[in-house]
Amino acid sequence: MNMQWAVERLREVMHPPARGDMADWDAVYEQCGLRFPQDYRDFVSVYGGGTIDDYLGISTPPTGESFYGDLLEDLESPAEEDENHPYPYPPYPGTEKLIRWASDPDGDDAFWVLGSDDPDQWSVAVKNHQGRSWSSFDGGMAEFLLAIVTGRYSSPFAAADFPSPRPLYRNWRDEDE
């Protein structure tokens, strides 16, 4: 099977670590009843759980000793909604479901919007907690990251210096060294 195009392009602009993570996607499906997008599965196998520029943390299903293997935990306890700034979509498992796949130290979160039964059609929404705003991206997770690191899409995250001109991905193995 060919790698999803956006992940291939990401590899050119944000060099991957020595190895990614091997997730058991059948076990993930058995546990939560969801199939995840191909671009995300490819991203996990190439990059693994970790951070972009030591800022944006990318969650994965449980894999080894990874601190980032908390993706399925967010299915059980969706992101909190505050009364001053409600989500435009109900958290998973609402009608228009959200699943968090990334977060940053400023409290911003990136979600898939499950607007389709086909996970490859899921789009991205980001809640910027400091600006108390939502932004939407009509594309998948890897395409969203690619658009941000190449400057084709303005980063909705709070840090003004994210991403850096030469984004660096550090997976959990690198952080343990």
Image: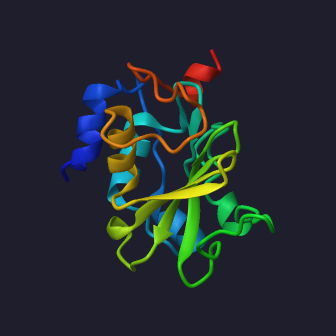
Q: x%, y% of residue 145?
A: 39, 42
Left or right? Give the position of 64 relative to 141.
right
Q: x%, y% of residue 86?
A: 70, 69
Residue found 29% across the figure and 27% down from its top: 13
Query: Would you place residue 40 above or below residue 64 in this image?
Result: below
Nearest to the observer: residue 123 or residue 37: 123
Nearest to the observer: residue 43 or residue 133: 133
- Quadrant location of residue 122? bottom left
Query: Would you place residue 38 above or below residue 11 in this image?
Result: below
Left or right? Give the position of 175 relative to 135.
right
Query: Would you place residue 42 above or below residue 160 in this image?
Result: below
Residue found 33% across the figure and 66% down from its top: 120
Nearest to the observer: residue 100 or residue 89: 89
Which residue reaches farthest top? 177
Left or right? Give the position of 2 relative to 148.
left
Residue found 40% across the figure and 64% down from its top: 123
